Image (cartoon, grey):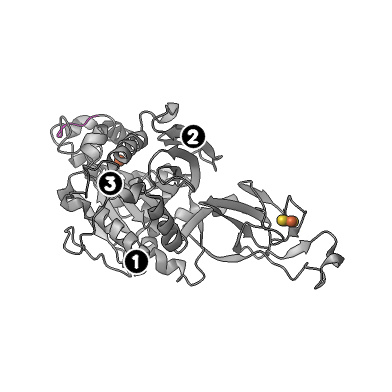
Amino acid sequence: MATVLRTEPIDAGDAGFLRGDPITGDRYYSKDFARREWDRMWTKVWHVAGREAQIPEPGDWMTHHFGRESIVVIRQTDGSVRAFYNTCQHRGNRLVWAEDGHGQLTCSYHGWVYAADGVLSKAQDPDDFEDGSPCGRVSLRQVKCASWGGFVWYTMDPEAGSLDEFLDPIPDLLERRDLHDMVRVVWRTISVDANWKFASDNFNESYHLPTVHPELATTTDEDYKNTVFESYPSGHNRMIEQGQPSMRAPKPNEVEAPFGDMLREWDLDPAEFAGRARDGRLALQRQRRALGPQRGFSHYARYADDELTDFFHHTLFPNVTLTATAEGTHFFRTEPDPHDPEKCTFDYWFMAPRVEGQDEVMTIVGPRPLKEAPHEFVEYGSGAVIEDMMDSFLIQDLSVAVGQQAGFHSRGYRDAILSGQESRVRRFHEVLNDYLEGRR
Ligand code: FES
Ligand SMILES: [Fe+2]
């Protein structure tokens, strides 16, 4: 069941393909650097505006406020989507502020009204304009927009290549996951006092797992020797960790919770794996393969064996990580604060497959109904308590992000000293430099 890739990875887990660009602290706090990121990178790449499921009907719209820009995406009568700058053509007022809505877009300043196709349909005193009524002649400024994986994407660059080209080879790698059909059961935005790049760095390595997430050792083998690391010419990366106890776990050969619970859930007796816990991974694959369909997990039939147990992290340049697991796909994204490079927002979405007969799904914030979630906003800043997340790996990652942000300011820090498996961290910065220096 091997995937045929359009593009092969460019590294085999060593750093030989890198230039060695330094990862200096100012990249994380300099306003000038952030401005260059905006001018040369953010305004060139493709962005996720939201989920298709947010705008199912013609006339439905949703906004994505990004930096100082805002984009409005509207479902057309033929089912396609179009995206526009969310700014009134009359005198520049931001047109709509809500996250989503339905019907014509009305400007709150002088009441100009725009139809779903972006064309002005109504204006006050149309006869008072020198060239005649602006209605039918004036239109919102459109941006390129396309869909993949149930996400609506757009780019502010009129010269940008296709979304397909931009994403390559991620759609191939995630082909069997049916992301377009998944339900976003957690939709949360967290404010963090750190530069947005911490997440791109962090999700590109498994080196921090034993120290930052020691509790994952019973289920996640973070050892670089057992982990797949890949970089692609497009700037995206992939890392695959095996779903089995790490040899660094306190008792690596014994089945500990929650690995034991997982086995039990699939009718396997943890006692049978005493002294050989890591065999549980293959047994779990066989069991999910055998029992999945009758338990409503019809999608398991399409998954490769490893996809039934392992963690497939895809870091999409610059700011999206999609971690595909047998339970569902995690979407992580950081976006820069429009004014302060030392702040960002962190989006966490969990997208669950539809399972026949199941109306609830387990997530890192507890059980959630298997239906589209409302958007929650949470303050973390530099360490506020988020009740339902305190035990999750996410808060652990956020807390080190804040500590690292402090360290970046020190004259004692010059450049990162990276292990082999952290090649993708430098790779990320080199791709960013390619944008900033006009090579992409
Ligand atoms: S600025 Fe929108 S109607 Fe005047
Ligand atoms: Fe982490």
**Residue situated in front as seen by the camera: 407 or 16:** 407
Residue 120: image quadrant is bottom right
Give the mark toward the camera: 3 or 2.
Answer: 2
Q: Is residue 402 above or below residue 226?
A: above
Look at the image and tell me whether residue 325 can be seen.
no
Look at the image and tell me whether residue 364 can be seen.
yes
The residue that appears at 37% across and 58% down in the rendered structure is 317
Query: In this figure, which residue is indicated by the disc labeled 3?
Result: 285
| Residue 79 placement, left or right of 370 | right
> How far apart in space, not on screen, are marks 1 and 3 (Cα)?
46 Å
Q: Is residue 7 above or below residue 293?
A: below
Q: Is mark 2 within 8 Å of ligand 2?
A: no
Q: Quadrant of the C terminus?
A: bottom left
The type of residue carrying mark 2 is Val
In the image, the segment drawn in magenta is: 252-256
The type of residue carrying mark 3 is Gln
Tag 1 secondary structure:
loop
The residue that appears at 21% across and 55% down in the rendered structure is 423
> How far apart in space, not on screen, are marks 3 and 2 (Cα)?
36 Å
> How far apart in space, not on screen, are marks 1 and 2 (Cα)?
36 Å
What number is the disc on residue 378?
Answer: 2
Assess whether mark 3 and mark 1 are in contact (beta carbons under 8 angstroms): no
- The mark that comes first in sequence, 1 or 3, is 3
Tell me where residue 250 appears, x and y as whole percent.
Answer: 16, 30
Query: In this figure, which residue is indicated by the disc labeled 1?
Result: 437
Assess whether mark 2 and mark 3 are in contact (beta carbons under 8 angstroms): no
- The mark that comes first in sequence, 3 or 2, is 3
Whether residue 232 is in magenta: the answer is no
Tell me where residue 344 appears, x and y as whole percent.
Answer: 43, 44
Q: Residues within 10 Å of mark 1 (few under 14, many from 20)?
A: few
